[in-house]
Amino acid sequence: MRILVGSDLHNNVRGNTWFCNLADSLRPDALVFLGDFITFEPLEFARGVLRDLASLGVPALVIPGNCDPRDLLLHIDQIEGVTNLHNRALRVNGFTFVGRGGSITCPSPTPFEEPDESFAAPLEPLIQGADVLVVHQPARGFRDRIAGVGNVGSESLLKLIAAHQPRLVLSGHIHEAKGLDVWGQTTFVNPGALLALNAAVINLGQHIQVDFKEGDE
């Protein structure tokens, strides 16, 4: 199964066009968007991106980011052709995807966040046997490092992953943490920010292969 993954668009029209053109040329089996369609507003921009993803004709699994207002969840559910994966599980091409949007508490308040202590709890009844964990917020120690600050990932998410060991964890949020890590049976991937024309193509089969894509800035 080939998955095209994007994250952290933050109102960028060029990034949206580039991602949709990439999807149109690659024809993946599924699209995954990891949140932060916008930076607080406007919702209409996010709705436009959702409509663009729906028009591509491949399954599109999306979650909100911490900078997306919570009302975005209602809009996702209203658009045919995209699936709201927030606190839900979905089987696609024989693989189980489980999703959780938003982030843990940030230094500056954002619309979609909550304390780390409770962040992973909604995933507990969903994650058993999951192949792919789709989150905006990274786990502690994996694709979560900010220069001059250190690791800012979720401890509760790390404990959940350690207990259930999904094959693949997709996260965004930390724009400069693009790349991959491997820990035991789990591969962690941050595709980079669509704001800077970054995405990732992942082949999910017996082995996991990751190809990072970059546009011309």
Image: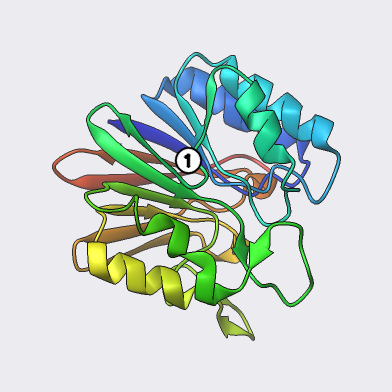
Residue 111 placed where, x, y %? 76, 57
Would you say 140 lies left or right of 1 here? Answer: right
Residue 125 placed where, x, y %? 34, 54
Q: Nearer the viewer, residue 204 or 40?
A: 40
Please give the name of the residue rendered at 61% of the width and 28% of the height, measured from the top-left corner. 77
Residue 34 placed where, x, y %? 55, 46
Would you say 37 lies left or right of 171 here? Answer: right
The quadrant in which the N terminus is found is top left
- Residue at disc 1, secondary structure: strand
Q: Nearer the viewer, residue 217 or 115?
A: 115
Please give the name of the residue rendered at 65% of the width and 27% of the height, measured from the top-left corner. 50
Residue 159: quarter of image: bottom left
Q: Which residue is mark 1?
A: 5
Please give the name of the residue rendered at 60% of the width and 60% of the height, measured from the top-left corner. 173
Residue 37: quarter of image: top right
Q: Nearer the viewer, residue 27 or 92?
A: 92
The amino acid pointed to by label 1 is Val
